[in-house]
Image (cartoon, rainbow, N blue to C red):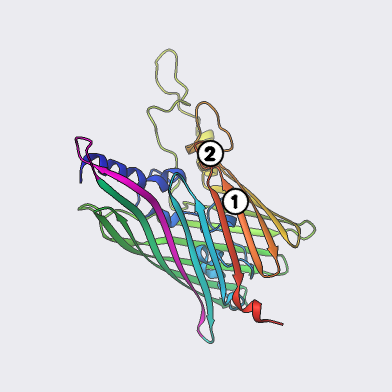
Amino acid sequence: MKLQKRLLLILYCGLCSMLFAQTGGKTVFNFLDMPVSARVSALGGRLVSIRENTDYSLPILNPSMLNQQLSTGVAFNCVDYFSDAVYGHFNYMHHFSKVGTFNFAFQFATYGSFVETNEFGEELGTFTAGDYGLIVGYGRELVDSMFSLGMNLKLFFSDYAHYFSSGMAVDFAASYYCLPKNISLTLLLKNIGVQFNPYDAKREKLPFDIQLAFSQRLKHLPVRYNIILHHLYTWKMSYDDPTDPFAVIDAVTNTKVEQGKGRQFFDNMFRHFTFALEILPVKYISIQVAFDYNTRKQMRSYDRKGMVGFSYGLGVHIRNINVYYARSHNNLASTPNHFTFSTQINSFFKK
């Protein structure tokens, strides 16, 4: 493959990691880290610990929330990404007596069609690029539904012109739910796996993460707050950029002035947090808003900050049909539109 084509593929392979503010873009199959639904995107794009029997897309991210009440639930998510890029998923859940509840999902991310050229700029034709994944999730409730466990098995592959790669990963999740206080807590170990066929001679890492999410719906207000911690396996998420335009330069020595230890500590600490609110004014409407400090720090611009790091969305719930829309400001270049539709098949046959 010629140089221009190789550079173009590398750019698109790294697109997900750059736009979702990963810690350096050192992994492959980053489409596995994309928000699984508009609601999740509006709540910060990471783990959500909400136990509801009306959201049929959440178990893709949090399999420990699978339960019998979600059986025959279906969800479709689609995101109008950048240029010709589109990603989304489709999933279906079913409960099997004495075994547990399963979730079957298909994820995709297509990046459009590209012109292939040689080193002289001569066009040789076109090629396409995309990532695809199959997910089987399993969840089971324990101890009067206060505790639940879940696991996802993921098989995925990518096809970039003459480059092909595949891999497998698993997610493990454990949740605690307290009904009287409307409290939910989830620990997630995400994307533990291996790349089977590397693009080149060397295998690369998957986007592994450890996340912890806490949520509580307030008793006297129609509000649910969410606190999510991510990248718990590492402390420092920032990186030293020699061309950082925000760096303070000593006028005498012409060297970078380092931040104080206290400021460095709090900067590193808050990079692990995502804060989100869900407002439930009436039964048929829900509003989501979130802020991610790490995204704002990594994707900020010297000229202006804008809404980078913020996300928001709206949900409409009519009978057994749920429609979510969200926008996530992960950079200043563009703001993707997220759409999710979900329902429960057997509800149409109930009297």
Start-end of magenta stretch: 99-124
Residue at the (30%, 44%) spot, across then down:
115
Q: Which residue position is annotated with label 2?
A: 296
State the image quarter where residue 237 is shown.
top left
Is the magenta region chiefly helix, strand or loop? strand
State the image quarter where residue 304 is shown.
top right
On the question of residue 191 being in view, the answer is yes
Q: Position of residue 205 (x, y in %)?
A: 32, 54
Judging depth in this view, the residue of 304 and 221 nearest the camera is: 304
The label number, if any, that marks residue 279 in the structure image: none
Residue at the (60%, 56%) spot, across then down:
39
Residue 343, compared with residue 132, is above or below; it is below
Judging depth in this view, the residue of 272 and 3 nearest the camera is: 3
Circle 1: residue type: Ala
Q: Is residue 347 left or right of residue 234?
A: right
Name the element at disc 1. Answer: strand
Q: Inspect the magenta stretch and tell me whether residue 116 lies in it.
A: yes
Q: Position of residue 291 (x, y in %)?
A: 60, 45
The label number, if any, that marks residue 326 in the structure image: 1
Residue 168, compared with residue 297, is above or below; it is below
Q: Position of residue 309 (x, y in %)?
A: 56, 41
State the image quarter where residue 278 is shown.
bottom right
- Other-residue count near label 2 (Cα within 10 Å), few / some / many at <14 / 14–19 / ≥20: many
Circle 2: residue type: Arg
Residue 189, compared with residue 237, is above or below; it is below
Q: Is residue 109 left or right of residue 220?
A: left
Query: Residue lying furthest top in this view?
Result: 252
Q: Position of residue 112 (x, y in %)?
A: 38, 50
On the question of residue 43 being in view, the answer is no
* Callout in the foreground (1, 2): 1
